[in-house]
Amino acid sequence: MTTSRPQIILDCDPGHDDAVAIVVASHTCDILGITTVAGNAPLDRTTYNARVLRHMLNLDVEVHSGAGRPLVVPPVFAGYVHGESGLDGADLPEPTRAVDGTDAVGFIIDTVRAHPGCHLVVTGPMTNIALALRSHPDLGNDLAGISFMGGGTFGNRTPMAEFNLWADPHAAQIVVNSGLPLTMAGLDVTHQFQATPPRIERVREIDGQLAAVLSGLFDFFSANYSSRHDDMEGAAVHDPLAVLALTHPDLFTTESRFVDVVTDGEHTRGMTVIDRRTLIDRPAATCTVLVGIDADAAWDVTISAIRAGSANR
Ligand code: RIB
Ligand code: CA
């Protein structure tokens, strides 16, 4: 299995699956910083939750909060999936380290400039990333690329739109049309990576506070998914795939596609248009789209990350 340990900034809205992305990234990446955005919950909660994960992992990484609302559309949160706290389902430890700043966009720009060749991993609405690209259009010169969770050929917020891109479609359109190397973990692949009961039991068997908290979070998250879908054994653990796409590319099958984002329409706002035509004169591909995953192997990596994170305390 080919692996690499990329330098990343993780922009997220914790969120149960964002929490797993932080754990996996702590084990597989050099995290230059964590930035937060409103999405699954309001910004104060997603930022608090990022601090909780940093605390449990004993990570010496800065957390900077960012946009509290989308660029244009009104903010809408996902308490119906993640609970009002954004991380319902477990007793969370009180984080002892304060947030390191409230200018995520400035932190992203400064950190990318200081670490040419780093990646942005985006697991929430893309507001911070769009603002950074708008204020520094040449930021891409120092970026290896952007790996994001979002989109797909179907939706979860509407029949056609996935939550992250639906929540801030104008930001998503800016990022997807940035011309930067993009990797997209959409619902087509993330729904193949479910926290089924046997997989959650493997988490529960790990000693330590991190595994205990995560098993509670998985229980809540999967109960929510199973109650709201008629074909899912557990929650789709979306966000860590945006990390694993960089660190464990061999776990995935991919397609190179032209992708754009629709910004309006009752059913289409936030929808990704993925051009899968075989026409020779189709638009040039702009995105590496993840389409398949070795879910068991990816869960093995997740378990290893949780074990390693538990040993950090
Ligand atoms: O649609 C799934 C995405 O929306 C995930 O990133 C989840 O955390 C929520 O933000
Ligand atoms: Ca998320």
Image: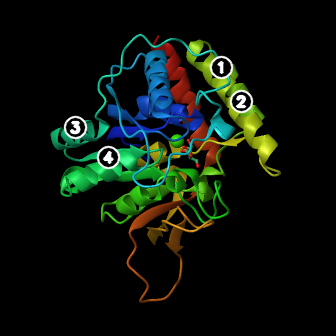
Q: Is mark 2 within 8 Å of ligand 1?
A: no
Q: Label 3 sits on what residue type? A: Thr
Point 33% across, 60% down: residue? 181
The residue singled out by tag 4 in the image is 119
Q: Residue at x 47, y 53 (%)?
A: 168
Which residue lies at the image location 44% right of the left edge and 16% below the top edge?
55
From the image, state whether disc 4 or disc 3 is nearer to you.
3
Label 2 crowd bin: few (<14), some (14–19), many (20+), radius 10 Å: many
Dot 1: element: loop
Which amino acid type is shown beneath numbered disc 4?
His
The residue carrying mark 2 is 220
The residues tagged by marks 1 and 2 sit, at their Cα atoms, a distance apart of 8 Å
Residue 15, image quadrant: top right
Label 3 vs label 2: CA separation? 35 Å
Q: Amino acid at mark 1?
A: Ala
Q: Earlier in the sequence, mark 3 or mark 2?
A: 3
Separation of residues labelled 1 and 4 (CA atoms): 31 Å
Disc number placed over residue 111 in the picture, else none = 3
The residue that mark 1 highlights is 90
Nearer mark to the viewer, of 1 and 4: 1
| Residues at circles 2 and 4 in contact by the CB criterion of under 8 Å | no
Q: Are marks 3 and 2 in contact (CB under 8 Å)?
A: no
Residue 248 pos. (x, y %): 46, 46
